[in-house]
Image (cartoon, rainbow, N blue to C red):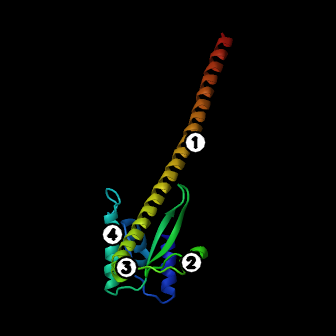
Amino acid sequence: MRGSRRLIRELIAGGKQVKILCVGRKGRDQLRRDFGSLIIGTIEDIAKPRLTFDAADRVAERIARMYGDGEFDVCTIIYNRFKSAMTQFVTTQQLIPFAPPAAGAAADRALAGATYEYEPDESEILAELLPRNLSVQVYRALLENGASEQGARMTAMDSATRNAGDMINRLTINYNRSRQAYITKELIEIISGAEAV
């Protein structure tokens, strides 16, 4: 959410018009406080009972439809990229217009002289592949975000379990000390009573 807020503020400060399409209620509820007027829609319950490619495809279709209607010129998705159960990275990825990743110099040299013929023609292939690529990128972002959420939950539960165990150990020691003090007090009273007789 911090990464989203930061990007939104940067875009607004740069004089850009910002529209927010939230995927999920949590994001919408968080962003509604500061940017409620910028939220144009929310897509809910796409991961119930579990996340599927069809759900991501519906999100991608909506994005493509909005782009086709001229509602925006750049689409950026913000999600958490999973590295480990304890580490997730906020990732900002431009979906539209498609920005291919930078290739290495060796790959560029290897493909520099290559000529390809396409069957069917390039426009038909691109008409099929670009929407599919958008769906795959959305699906990947949703999967990464879901894995990051589960990792964060696992870390939080591990920490809570460890803290509960520490508290149980402290309470057990405190209970044993109190019990020992009570037993010692009873013994002193019995010994004092026996000496008085």
Q: Earlier in the sequence, mark 2 or mark 1?
A: 2
Q: Could you say whether the residue bearing mark 4 is in a helix, strand or loop?
A: helix
Q: Position of residue 191 (x, y in %)?
A: 66, 15
Could you tell whether 70 is left or right of 7 in the image?
left
Image location of residue 18, percent across then percent down = 42, 83
Give residue 108's mark.
2
Element class at badge 2: helix
Q: Which residue is mark 4?
A: 57
> Considering depth in this image, is 154 or 103 the residue closer to the camera?
103
- Residue 118: give x, y in percent of width and height: 38, 78
Label 2 is placed on what type of residue? Asp
In the rendered view, tell whether residue 164 sits above or below residue 36: above
First of labels 2, 3 by sequence position: 2
Give amino acid for label 1. Answer: Asp
Instruction: Give me the C-alpha separation between circle 2 and circle 1.
Output: 57 Å
Q: Could you tell me which secondary element the residue under label 3 belongs to?
A: helix
Camera-side mark, 1 or 3: 3
Tell me, yes or no, whether the two marked residues, 4 and 2, touch with CB atoms within 8 Å. Answer: no
Q: Compute the Cα span from label 3 to label 4.
A: 17 Å
Q: Whole-Å distance between the Cαs marked 1 and 3?
A: 59 Å
Image-quadrant location for residue 109:
bottom right
Would you place residue 1 above or below residue 71 in this image?
above
Asked if one can make out residue 40 in the rendered structure from this viewpoint, the answer is no
Task: Give the label, 4 or 1, closer to the camera.
Answer: 4
Residue 126's tag is: 3
**Residue type (three-letter) at the residue carrying disc 4:** Asp
Amino acid, disc 3:
Leu
